[in-house]
Image: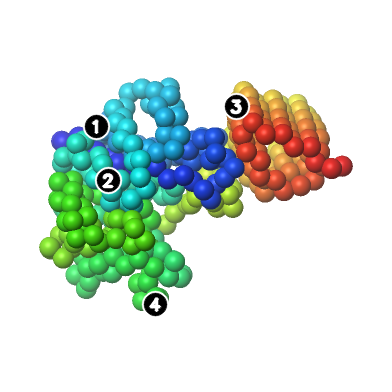
Amino acid sequence: MSEKLKVVIPMAGFGTRLRPHTWSKPKQLISVAGKAVIDHVLGMFSTLPDPQNIELVFVVGYLGEQMLPHMRENYPHLTVHYVEQEEMRGQSHAVYLTKEHLHGPLLIVFADTLIDTDLSFLQDEEAEAVIWVKPVPDPRRFGVTMVGEDSWVTRLIEKPKDMDNNLAVVGCYYFKRSEDLLTAIEEQMQRGIQLKSEFYLADAINLMLNRGMRMRVETVDVWLDAGTPNTLLETNAYLLAHGCDNTHEVEKRPGVVVVTPVYIHPQAQVESVIVGPNVSVGAGSCIKRSILSDSIIEENARVENAVLQKSWVGCHAQVQGRESIIDIGDHSAITLET
């Protein structure tokens, strides 16, 4: 792949399912397993044939300006463009807003899902497009792909009524020619092909399939959701168990009992605690005389004299008290009854 790969990441949504945390930051900067969600997404691109030969295009919205300092600090070597989606008109509309940056090969990744995939095959990919899927027991709440006997995709269906096609679309797409997708989106918008006042990418892809585009599926085994508090805690647990655990560093701290897996940032202060399993603690946080399990403690939070499970404590938040399950946003404080 000699031409530079463009990677479009739509992230303009309000993240309403993750409030109160998304009142103060975009969901892509929420911490999970010691890193921001966007960091885990960008980590997937390390398997590209040439990870440096890419340009990122972020479609941002509410609080999107917070992405700039994060990318400058952590990815100064990458070229990043920012396009604002002021009106939520759907996935196709978001991609179309990036048209001035698109030519040649294109990868689209939606940033509220994380997948485990090896992208090295794109160097020799012969299909005109690739769509990533995962077999699921009940496909009726997902978008799914229909695949013909020749193994080429024939159609995408949003939330099918039957169980015949179980290959759920996970939110990652490759197009050999981004120009062809833009042409299809233009036709989609001109014809007003939308659902609930939004232009869905599946409809643009169906137009391309009708014109004979050869698209194949790439199956993944791991598909993680970072879109709700419960699924975010599940994703945190999975990532900790698959490469993000730093128990060997934490166990060296006096007064700390670890139930693996955990991630505790080197700049976090932990004293007289039992931590784990499935706990991540961000930089600058202070945890004292507490027991934590299945929880996320973000940067610069403070937890004292508490027993927390299945909880999420935002940046600069403060928690004191006894046993509870809590979800507290950034710069908040709560004292639990003893």
Of residues 42 and 313, the one nearer the viewer is 313
Of residues 37 and 264, the one nearer the viewer is 37
Residue named by callout 2: 95
Q: Are marks 1 and 3 in contact (CB under 8 Å)?
A: no
The quadrant the C terminus occupies is: top right
Residue named by callout 1: 53
Instruction: Identify the element where label 1 is drawn.
Output: loop
Residue 312: percent from left, percent from top: 64, 42
Of residues 319 and 90, the one nearer the viewer is 90
Indicate which disc, 1 or 2, sits on the residue closer to the N terminus.
Answer: 1
269 w.r.t. 104: above or below: above
Residue named by callout 3: 283
48 w.r.t. 130: above or below: above
- Mark 3 vs mark 2: give the one in front: 2
Residue 206: percent from left, percent from top: 22, 63
- Give the residue at x 72% y 48%: 325
How far apart are the two marked residues, 1 and 2, measured between alpha carbons?
A: 20 Å
- Give the residue at x 16% y 65%: 210
Indicate which disc, 1 or 3, sits on the residue closer to the N terminus.
Answer: 1
